[in-house]
Every structure is written in C-alpha cells, then in structure tokens.
Image: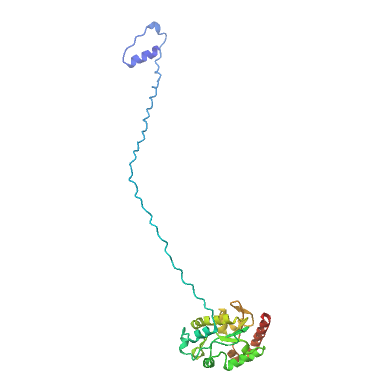
Amino acid sequence: MIATHIYYLKAMGIDSWVRRDLITQETPITEPVHIPPPPQPVVTTPIIEPVRIPIPQPPLPVVETPIIEPVHIPQPPQPVVITPSWESLQHQVVTCTACELHKTRIQTVLGVGNQNADLMVIGEAPGADEDVQGEPFVGRSGKLLNAMLYAIDLKRESIYIANVLKCRPPGNRNPQLPELVCCQTFLDIQIQLIKPKLIVAVGGIAAHHLLATNTGIGKLRGQLLAYKNIPLIATYHPSFLLRRPSEKRHAWLDLQLIRHTLNEIS
C-alpha cells in the first residue's frame, strides 16, 4: 500500500516523505494494477416499425361479361357416293378429255368379255386395229391371245379383256405416265365391277404400272403376285411373242400357272 501511495505522489510531482523507521528495506515501486473500467451499458435503439396507413382505393368498375351466342358453323356437305355402273363408266370414258390422247383417237376402247368373269386380262393400250374397231386385242395379237387361252380351256367370251389405256397413243408409242394416271380410275372401276379372282397382266408396261415396279417382265413372270389383294400373274404380251417365238415356251409355263391358280381359287 505504501509503495502504491508513493507511486501516485511521484506521478503528480509531489515529494513524498516517509519515516525512516517505517522503511526497513528499499520499498520497490511497482506498477499499479490496471483495473479496467466497468463495461458501459449497451443502449439498444428500439426499431420502430413504420405505421402503414392504408390508402383507400377507388372501387373497381363492374364490367359485365357480354353473353356471346355460339356461332353455328355449318358442316360441309357429305359427298354423294354414286355406285359405279357400266353405263356411267362407258359415258365417262367416251367423253374423257383428261389427256392429249383424246385429240388423236378414233374411238375409245373400254373392254370386252364376261363382266362377271373370274379371270381379267389387262394389256397396255389399244393399237391401230383396236382404235378402229373399239375392241382390245384384235388383229394378229388378238388371234394369238385367243389361241393361248384355248390352250388352257378358256374362251375369249368367258373372260374379260381390257387395257390400262383406253385411247391409242399416236404411232403406237409407249404410254406416258400422265396418260396412265388419267386412265387409272377407269381401270379400278372395271376391276371393282368385275371382281375378278385373278388378274393377268400381259406386257411389261401393264405389269410395271399395276405392280408399281421397274423390274423386267422376265423376272416378274412365272410367279404369283398381287394387285390390291387380287392375285396377279404377269406374262409376255402376244405382240412380243410374235417377234420372239422362242419365248413361247416361257409363256406356256405362265399359262399353266394361270390354269392351276384358277383351279385353286375357283
């Protein structure tokens, strides 16, 4: 305590007097003990929430929803389904001007034979003789076809014979695709009316068109194919056989296949 007292007096520049009898030894002057001041109280400023004063909003206008009457949309008229007949088909073919062949034809060639036949023979197009007579497969080709049918016990009158085209192309040239497309409806109506059990396509053009292929007739023949789920056999055209008699042996095999198929499906 004495040492502390002397320290403070000295710090203030005051001389201190101490009785000798109290000093037994040199009193060390020690540094005062630092006593930290008490912590100041933390004053927390209260957070005052702002007072929200509601601002009155004007009332929303009342909008009346208009009543919309449903619009009546008329239904398109249903197409009139006309059952095809031979009379209507003949009239459509005779008056057809869908392609350029109507300008050069003498007459149209629809078909000939039994309209309820099991076998339908389809060729390519009328030739010069057919254009004059209005009947398919006449002249030399027609006579050979008749002989081929007779070889398998069939008569011309017992089957139906038609061509893909109903008008003769000028100069007996090959039919062109637009011409084949124009006549396709007529051929389909004929098939629909006849309902044949077997179709025989004679010639590469007829076979290619009905089967939608470019495969050669030599590879198509000799097998059972189909057109719209109707069995179909392709074979050589009689005019080709007249030019290439050596191919008649292959045609004879096709005729046997035709006869066998008719026996199976009849």
Image quarter (top left, top right, bottom left or bottom right) of the C terminus? bottom right
In the shown orientation, is residue 135 left or right of residue 41? right
- Please tell me in which quadrant of the rendered image residue 224 appears: bottom right
- In the displayed structure, 265 sits above or below 71; it is below
Picture mark count? 0
Q: Which percent across, then down, holds residue 52? A: 35, 38
- Location of residue 3 in the rendering, given as x and y in whole percent from the top left corner: 39, 13
- Residue found 52% across the figure and 80% down from its top: 185
Q: Residue furthest left?
A: 13
Q: Nearer the viewer, residue 168 or 61?
A: 61
- From the top left corner, tell me how far across and down residue 246 is, in percent: 63, 90
Name the quadrant of the N terminus. top left
The correct choice, above or below, for 45 with respect to 250 in the image is above
Between residue 112 and residue 262, name the one nearer to us: 112
Residue 27 in picture, x, y percent from top left: 40, 12
Q: Residue furthest top?
A: 21
Q: Residue at x 53, y 85 (%)?
A: 87
**Which picture quadrant has residue 40?**
top left
Determine whether 5 is above or below 229 in the image: above
The one nearer the camera, 82 or 180, is: 82
Q: Could you say which quadrant of the image residue 228 lies in? A: bottom right
Instruction: Indicate left or right for 8 with 188 as reference.
Output: left
Looking at the image, what colour scheme do you see? rainbow
